[in-house]
Image (cartoon, rainbow, N blue to C red):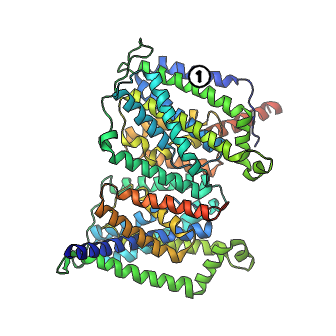
Amino acid sequence: MDKAVSFLSFVILYGVSYGLVLFLISIGLVLTMGLMRVVNLAHGSFAAIGGYLCAFLMNRYAFPYGVAVVASVLAVAALSVPIERVFYARLYGASELDQVLMTVGLMLATAATITLVFGPDVYPSSLPGVLARNIDLGFRTFQAYRLFVIVLGVALLVALWYVFDRTSFGALVRAAVDNPSMAESTGINVKLLFSATFALGSGLAAMGGAIGFAMLPLEPLYPFKYLTLVLVVVVLAGIGNIKSSAGVAVAVGVVDTTGRYLAPTYGAFLIYGFLILVLLLRRLGAPGRGIA
Amino acid sequence: MTYRILRRGVHPAEAGYWLALLAIFLVFPTHLSLATTALIFALFALSYDLILGFAGIVSLGHAVFYGVGAYSAGLLALGGVREPISGALLAGLTAAALGACIAPLVLLFDGLALMMMTLAIGVIFYEAANKLTWLTGGDDGLHGIVIDPLFGVFRWSVYGYTSYLYVLGWLFVLFVLVRTIVGSPFGAALQGIRENTTRMYLVGAPVRLHLFRVYVMSAFVAGIAGALSAQTTQFVGLEVISLDQSIDAMVMLVLGGAGRLYGGLIGAPVYIVVRDWASAWNPYYWMFVISALLIAVVRFGRRGILGAADGLADAARRYIARGVP
C-alpha cells in the first residue's frame, strides 16, 4: 500500500510537472504548425535559448530566478520576430523538404552558437533555495520545484485557455488555423497574426526551457535532444489543436515517467510505439487523408 | 527547369568524375580512410536519392537500413561468414527484407505524417540497438570484425588501399544499377509520382506498388553502404542507426542536388571534406558551416552544387553565343 502511494505520488508529481514543461515547449509548435503550416524542427532552439539565458542571468548577474525567467522569455519573444521575418516568412507554402532543411539548418546554427558562447558541456544551472529544498510528505520527499512547476504550468494553461477561447486575438488565431485564406479575405492581417503567434509560441518555449532547466539539462544539443518528444506531442494532439495538446503533453509526461520507472530498459519504446499506433489508427480511420 | 526523364548516353563529365575518384587513390594515398568514408556516404546518399530525389518520399529514418546493414555485416563476420562481397550482399538483402516489411506501414502516409512515422520507427530501432546489448554491443558497439582478404588475395592494410578500391567498386556497380533503374520507364513513373501523384493515379499507374519497389531497392543500397562501413572500419557503433545519420544523408544529398544521379556523389565528399576541415578547427563549429550551407541551399533554390554548376554552364554558354563584347 505504501509502495503504491509512493509510486502514484511520484508519477503525479514528476510526470505531470514534466508533462507541463513539455506542454509549454510544444504549444508554440502546435500553433505554428496549425497556423503557418511550417514543420519547424528548430522550435526547440527557443526553449534552449530561454533556458540558457535564464541560467546565464542568474549565474553572471545574480538575477533572482523570477526576474531571470521573465527577462529571458521577453528576450526570446523579441528575438523571434526578426527570425520569423527573415527565415520563416519564405517557408510559408514551401515544400516540406525545404522546411525541414531550413529549420534543421537553424537548429544546427543554434547548437553551434550555444557551444561558441557557453562551451560544449552541460551548462551549470541551479534553482533558488526555496525551490531546491525538499518537502516531506511523510511517505516520500520531493523537491518543492516540482510543485512550483505544476502550479505555474496550470496557471499558464488557464491563461492560455482564456486567451484562445475568450479574447478576440484567440478568435482570430482560431479562424486563421481553420481556414487561412478565408480569414485573410475577411480582412484579418494574417501576416501580423503570424508574427504575433510566432513570438508568443517562442516566448512560451523559452518559458518551458527556463522553468524546466532542472529537468531538461542545458546542453548544446538540447534543441535536437527533445525535438522528438515535442514532435510526438504535436502529432498526437493534432496539428493546430490547442486544447488537446495540454492533455496530450501531460499524458506523454506521465507515460514516459511511468515507463522509465517501471521498465527503465524499455521505457522509450512505449511512447514511440504509442505514436505509431495512433498514427495508424488515425490513418485507417480516415482513408485517403493525412493527419491534418 | 526541365527534367531529363529518360537518360541515354554518357556525359563526358561522368567519365571525368570516376577517373577523379581513381586519381584520388594515386594522389592522396595518405587520405584514403577519409576518402573511403566519403564514398560510403556517397552510396548512402545515392540510396536516399532514390526515394527522396526521384520518388519524393521525405523520410527521416533512412539510417535504419544503413544501420541494419552495418550490424548485419558485422554480425555475419563475427559469426564466421568472412567473405566480404557475399557478406555485404547478405547485409543488403537483410536491409531490403526489412524495407519490404516497413514500406507498407510508411507508404500509408505522406507529408508530415510520413516524416513522423519514419522518425518513430527510426527511434525505436535506435533504442533497440542500444538496449539489445547481447546482439549489438549497445553503447560499446561491435568490435573485432575481421574479414577475409578480397577475392582471397588482397589484404586489408592499415593504409586502406584495398578498402578504398573495394568501396569504389561497389559504388560504381550500384551507381550503374541505380542509373539504369532511374532511366527506365519505372524511373520515369517514379518522377511522375513525385511531380503529381494524383495524376499518376488517374493515368492508372500502380503508384503504391512503384513506391514499394523503390523503397525496397533504396533499403538494399543503404544496407550495402552500412555493410561497407562495418567491413572497412571493422567496427559498428550506435551512431550508424541514429537520427543524425538520416539527417546527414539528407544534407549531403541536398547539398549536391536532390533528384540528380550525382547529387549524393558530389554532396557527400564535399560534406565529409568540409566536416573534416572544420572539425580540425573545432569539433563543434562545423555545424555553423553546415547550417549556413543548408540555409543557402534553401534560400537560393533547392538545386544544390550541381544546380549551381548548371546555372554557371548556362551563363557561360549564353556568353559565348553572344560573342565576346
Q: Which image quarter: residue B20?
A: top right
Question: Looking at the image, is B211 positioned above or below residue A292?
Answer: above
Q: Report in which chain the residue with disc 1 lies.
A: B
> Which residue in the structure is indicated by mark 1?
B18
Residue B118 pos. (x, y %): 52, 51
User: Left of A131 or right of it: where is A96?
Assistant: right
Q: Where the N terminus of chain A falls, by quadrant?
A: bottom left
Along the viewing direction, whichever of A279 and A48 lies nearer the viewer? A279
Question: Of all residues shown, which one is farthest toward the top?
Answer: B153
Question: Looking at the image, is B237 positioned above or below residue B155?
Answer: below
In percent of the image, x 39 and y 71: which residue is there?
A19
Residue A63 pos. (x, y %): 30, 75
Query: Dot 1, how many residues are within 10 Å of its Cα: few (below 14), some (14-19), or many (20+)?
Result: few
Question: Of all residues shown, which one is farthest toward the right?
Answer: B322
Residue kind at label 1, given as amino acid type = Trp
Residue A22 pos. (x, y %): 41, 69
Along the viewing direction, whichever of A281 and A207 lies nearer the viewer? A281
Residue A279 pos. (x, y %): 54, 61
Q: Say which element carries label 1.
A: helix
Residue B304 visible? The answer is no
Q: Which image quarter: residue B29?
A: top left
In percent of the image, x 55 and y 54: which residue is there?
B115
Question: Of all residues shown, which one is farthest toward the bottom?
Answer: A166
User: Left of B325 or right of it: where is A281?
Assistant: left
In percent of the image, x 30 and y 68: which residue is there?
A214
Residue A233 visible? The answer is yes
User: Left of A93 or right of it: where is B135?
Assistant: left
In percent of the image, x 53 and y 55: which residue is there?
B117
Q: Where the C terminus of chain A falls, by quadrant?
A: bottom right
